């Protein structure tokens, strides 16, 4: 496979724009990546265009959960839960090291739901997965399961299992599978509008954010998987539209609130479910759920009120830890594309999480849905596109992820090898020379190897520094001040691989640090 970097992109772009495509996918999040992967598997000529960076929107700023949606059972959404649970099990089996099991504990303090009701919901949940996966622990046993948990009124806790992932790496792995089977993907391509002949969509016009050049692309079908931007390009019909809802999170150093399990509980202020869980050696506190009023083309950011809301959740369950603003390592906020019928009386948390498909001649728009079910959403979109493309539909679908090649990484532990296999998949052999050159040294206190950083800079279509530090790797979230102290060494390693001169690196570093302070750190205490 050819190099996948900025030089390749600049050379390939005119050629890719001059081709006739079976399918062009707009949107480089998990849904768009899934559509590209399934189209490539079926031999369709297919291209993905992303306006910013792969996983830039919701798919790098989610709650990192691969789950069946336990709370959807209570709302009667059994079909969504069944599909999610089965896809969760599929991903756990296909991508160990990237999608990993995570145990959850729900403390019971006499309110709703109590052990019996919650156990009943979990019995349904487990039945959908085909495996009993929960157990109640009385208080005397819960001490050992979750040290430091507030014991006032505590009756015990129920433990169950879901899964966790690095969402941005999941997107990159799916894109890698698509490219290995003939698909192409470009970031930094802003779609300006759809091209039509009469009522039928026949392609689109896009602007290269790097050069400012405009290109027209021809396609038999266009699939819009643009998430919160879904209403921007399609011709809306009826009342259904996308309601952007913001979910924000705090990231704490793992030593400050060490956990072996995710703790799920109801927030004292509004009764919404929130959670605290271990991720990448740190501890996540999330999430909020409110209407996002900010511009969609700018990075979402947590508000001061949301910080207080999440800290109050910590104080409820772990009062002795005294978690405060000074303990926060970083933050992130993502915008969920929730399909709404426009009922203003509905609170954000009361909106259903079902997806919608809107079809017009030559174009299919996907909105809503869940990270866990991206494969099923992709198949639904492709079925709708088949008639436009003129292809015969094949229902059979193999694994999302091809088996990872066996390679020798003698300097790494088995756990490190599993982690890298999960994140890189078929591309793992290309990392071997970097590990041989740079060894097993990690970047700061993270699990990320310097070898991973170099490999991503060279071969994962990094256009800007925030692509590398916030999405290809998570250094910008996991290290203090976005990894500022490591930037000189990152520059020495990655600047030659990215092909940037000194002036370009200085501009990129300044932009990255400004972005981090604005959108990934704490807002001012008195900010509204």
Image (cartoon, rainbow, N blue to C red):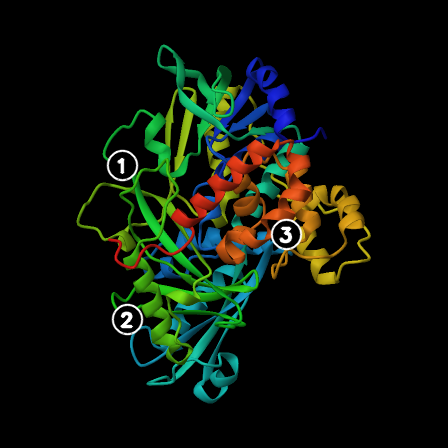
Residue 376 visible, this orientation: no
Instruction: Please give left or right for residue 270 compared with residue 40 in the image.
Output: left
Check residue 222 in the rendering and tell me which mark sits there, or answer none: none
Check residue 95 in the rendering and tell me which mark sits there, or answer none: 3
User: On the image, numbered disc 2 is attached to which residue?
Assistant: 268
For residue 61, above or below residue 3: below
Check residue 240 in the rendering and tell me which mark sits there, or answer none: 1
Q: CA distance from mark 1 to mark 2?
A: 33 Å
Q: Residues within 10 Å of mark 2 (few under 14, many from 20)?
A: some
Q: CA distance from mark 3 to mark 1?
A: 35 Å
Mark 1: secondary structure: loop
Judge by depth and name the residue closer to the eye, 60 or 255: 255
Decide which of tag 2 and tag 3 comes sooner along the chain: 3
Instruction: Please give left or right for residue 347 compared with residue 420 in the image.
Output: left
Q: Position of residue 390 (x, y in %)?
A: 53, 19
Residue 514 visible, this orientation: yes
- Quarter of the figure with residue 110: bottom left
Q: Position of residue 304 (x, y in %)?
A: 30, 57
Q: Measuring 51% from the left and 52% from the top, which residue is drawn there?
A: 482
For residue 325, above or below residue 212: below
Mark 2: secondary structure: loop
Which of label 2 and label 3 is nearer to you? Answer: 2
Instruction: Please give left or right for residue 430 compared with residue 196 in the image.
Output: right
Q: Measuring 68% from the left and 46% from the top, which residue is drawn there?
A: 425
Decide which of tag 1 and tag 2 comes sooner along the chain: 1
Q: Position of residue 210 (x, y in %)?
A: 51, 25
């Amino acid at each position: 496979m050819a190099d996948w970097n900025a030089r390749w992109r600049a050379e390939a772009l005119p050629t890719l724009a001059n081709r006739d495509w079976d399918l062009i996918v707009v949107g480089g999040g998990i849904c768009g990546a899934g559509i590209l992967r399934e189209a490539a598997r079926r031999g369709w000529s297919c291209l993905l265009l992303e306006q910013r960076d792969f996983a830039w929107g919701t798919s790098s700023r989610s709650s990192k959960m691969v789950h069946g949606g336990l709370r959807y059972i209570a709302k009667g959404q059994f079909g969504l839960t069944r599909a999610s649970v089965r896809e969760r099990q599929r991903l756990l089996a296909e991508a160990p090291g990237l999608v990993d099991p995570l145990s959850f504990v729900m403390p019971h303090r006499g309110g709703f739901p109590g052990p019996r009701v919650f156990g009943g919901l979990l019995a349904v949940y487990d039945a959908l997965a085909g495996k009993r996966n929960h157990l109640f622990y009385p208080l005397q046993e819960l001490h050992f399961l979750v040290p430091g948990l507030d014991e006032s009124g505590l009756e015990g806790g129920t433990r169950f299992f879901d899964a966790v992932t690095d969402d941005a790496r999941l997107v990159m792995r799916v894109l890698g599978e698509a490219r290995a089977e003939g698909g192409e993907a470009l970031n930094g391509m802003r779609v300006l509008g759809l091209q039509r002949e009469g009522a039928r969509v026949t392609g689109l016009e896009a602007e290269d954010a790097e050069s400012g050049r405009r290109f027209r692309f021809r396609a038999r079908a266009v699939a819009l998987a643009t998430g919160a931007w879904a209403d921007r390009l399609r011709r809306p019909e009826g009342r259904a539209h996308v309601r952007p809802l913001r979910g924000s999170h705090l990231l704490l150093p793992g030593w400050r609130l060490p956990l072996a399990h995710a703790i799920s509980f109801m927030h004292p202020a509004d009764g919404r479910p929130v959670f605290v869980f271990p991720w990448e050696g740190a501890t996540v506190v999330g999430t909020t759920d409110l209407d996002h009023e900010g511009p969609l083309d700018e990075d979402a950011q947590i508000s001061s009120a949301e910080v207080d809301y999440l800290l109050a959740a910590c104080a409820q369950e772990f009062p002795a830890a005294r978690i405060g603003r000074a303990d926060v390592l970083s933050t992130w906020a993502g915008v969920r594309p929730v399909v709404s019928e426009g009922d203003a009386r509905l609170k954000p948390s009361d909106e259903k999480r079902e997806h919608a498909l809107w079809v017009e001649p030559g174009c299919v728009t996907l909105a809503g849905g869940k990270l866990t079910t991206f494969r099923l959403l992709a198949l639904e979109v492709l079925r709708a596109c088949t008639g436009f493309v003129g292809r015969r539909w094949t229902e059979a679908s193999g694994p999302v992820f091809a088996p990872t090649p066996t390679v020798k990484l003698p300097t790494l532990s088995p756990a490190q090898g599993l982690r890298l296999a999960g994140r890189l998949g078929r591309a793992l052999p290309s990392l071997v020379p970097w590990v041989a050159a740079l060894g097993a040294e990690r970047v700061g206190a993270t699990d990320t190897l310097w070898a991973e950083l170099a490999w991503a800079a060279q071969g994962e279509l990094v256009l800007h520094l925030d692509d590398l530090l916030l999405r290809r790797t998570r250094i910008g979230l996991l290290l203090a001040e976005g990894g500022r102290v490591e930037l000189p060494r990152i520059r020495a390693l990655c600047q030659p691989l990215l092909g940037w001169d000194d002036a370009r690196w200085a501009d990129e570093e300044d932009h990255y640090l400004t972005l981090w302070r604005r959108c990934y750190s704490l807002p001012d205490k008195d900010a509204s």
